[in-house]
Amino acid sequence: MVADSIKFSAPGKVILFGEHSVVYGHPAIAAAIGLRALCEVTRSNEETITISAPMLFSDQTFTISEKSIVPTELESFKHILLLLSRSHENGFIPKVELSSSIPPSAGLGSSAATAVSLTASLLEFYGHDHDLETINDIAFESEKITHGSPSGIDNSISTYGGGIIYEKGVITPLTSKIPSSTLVIIDSGIPRQTKKLIEKVQKKKDVEPKNVQTIFNKIEDITLDAKKYLESGNIRQVGNLMNENHELLEKLDVGIPFISNIVDFIDKTDALGRKLTGAGGGGSVIALYDDYEYAKDVVSDFVINGFDAYLTNIFETGVKIEE
């Protein structure tokens, strides 16, 4: 008998090192954060599957069937619902509610975290045997609907948690020994445009191949050094490398004045390091601290000035069941 309510949550992510160079075969490091997506599945009294996502569409519920039309933001989740409902055996109809503390379009893996939490909840609801690999594979297929040709970083981090190194399509777990650290995330409020930023860097590489390749090589050196410092627990060196990585991203012209203003504000604080995370051109800036109470004050200052800012730890737990 299915439980009255099944809930799974999954974390968002940040790219700590290696943006843009990763597109050209260089390594990148990503980590799970404490901001999470949550899926609650209950047994419906209706004859059709329904889904609601108040963080995207307040007070709206959508019916899911082969012929139903849903907003673009829900297409990937419809895919998961139909995929798993076709093979269910218990005869139950799910009622799905999605929620999330991860801001959308901020480069923090919101869609992947939601897909992972939805997949895990539905597998449990239908009584399917499942493991993390199964959850990850299904979520990855849904991410293709959202992003076209995703790397697999977002869904992998959201499923397994912790940290990973991604290089040339290969994902390797990364074990961090840094002490409990605090990450401040500041959402610029400017939606990232990953595809356009990748194209912009490609054009710059076409015009300045040697210069851009030199930047990529330096980013790779920083990423590999960061791996060593994360594994050995040297948080201050990790912060220094974040600063260096950001300056190189600026040289790739993916920064914007508004992001620079956020970075300038952070530089007036006691941050160990800061950088944009993701493609740039908007999205989010991250800053690393080793004092929780101080970091809380930094977040408050940003909020007072009209920003959406968040306080979280990194290398958090992956998908998990919630009571």
Image (cartoon, helix red, strand yellow):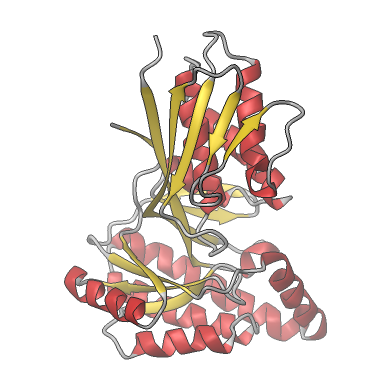
Can residue 258 be spotted in the picture? yes
Which picture quadrant has residue 195? bottom right
Can residue 130 be spotted in the picture? no
Classify 249 as above or below 24: below
Which quadrant is home to the C terminus?
Answer: top left
Q: Position of residue 304 (x, y in %)?
A: 32, 80
Depth order, front residue of 28/290: 290
Residue located farthest toward the front when viewing the structure as drawn: 59
Kindly identify the residue that appears in the image at 57 percent across and 62 percent down: 105
Q: Position of residue 130 (x, y in %)?
A: 48, 22
Q: Position of residue 57 (x, y in %)?
A: 56, 49
Classify 61 as above or below 95: below
Kindly identify the residue that appears in the image at 50 percent across and 55 percent down: 165
Which picture quadrant has residue 318? top left
Q: Position of residue 288 (x, y in %)?
A: 33, 72
Kindly identify the residue that appears in the image at 63 percent across and 80 percent down: 254
Q: Using residue 299 as the reference point, say whether residue 132 is left or right of it.
A: right
Which quadrant is home to the N terminus?
Answer: top left
Q: How many circles with numbers are drawn on the protein?
A: 0
